């Protein structure tokens, strides 16, 4: 029996400097980047995932 793993997709906690708000940004289905948008002004952001990974789990978008 296979379970869909969409519920435990990895995410980053992003601080959107434009609206001073935190939002979870999930890894995209292909697994090569994190993509999301600001919950207030809907500005799209995207982080490429480095091959060696990232040491930080938090990012600030300005
Ligand atoms: Zn915003």
Image (cartoon, rainbow, N blue to C red):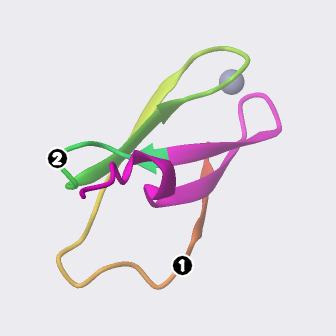
The structure residue drawn at horizontal position 71% and vertical position 30%, both measured from the top left corner, is: 18
Membership of 50 in magenta stretch: no
Q: Is residue 12 above or below residue 25?
A: below
Q: Is residue 10 magenta?
A: yes
Q: In the picture provided, is 7 more to the left or to the right than 21?
A: left
The magenta region covers 1-25
Measured along the vertical axis of the image, is residue 6 above or below residue 40? below
Screen quadrant of the N terminus? bottom left
Horizontal side of 62 relative to 18 (left or right) equals: left
Residue located 45% across and 61% down the image:
10
**Mark 1 or mark 2: which comes first in sequence?**
2
Residue labelled 2 has its Cβ within 8 Å of some atom of ligand 1? no
Quadrant of the picture in which ligand 1 is shown: top right
Q: Is residue 28 left or right of residue 39?
A: left
- Disc number for residue 30: 2
Q: Residue at x 36, y 54 (%)?
A: 5
Callout 1: 10 Å neighbours few (<14), some, many (20+)? few
The residue where tag 1 is placed is: 56
| Residue depicted at x 39% and y 78% | 54
Spatial separation of the CA atoms under disc 1 and disc 2: 21 Å
Q: Where does residue 9 sit, x and y in percent of width and height?
A: 43, 55
Do the numbered discs 1 and 2 sit on residues whose CB atoms are within 8 Å? no
Could you say whether the residue bearing mark 2 is in a helix, strand or loop?
loop
Across and down, in percent, residue 37 comes to 53, 27
């Amino acid at each position: 029996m296979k379970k869909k793993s969409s519920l435990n997709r990895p995410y980053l906690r992003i601080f959107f400097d434009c609206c001073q708000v935190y939002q979870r940004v999930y890894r995209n289905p292909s697994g090569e980047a994190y993509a999301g948008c600001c919950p207030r002004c809907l500005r799209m952001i995207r982080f490429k995932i480095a091959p060696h990974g990232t040491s930080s789990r938090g990012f600030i978008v300005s």
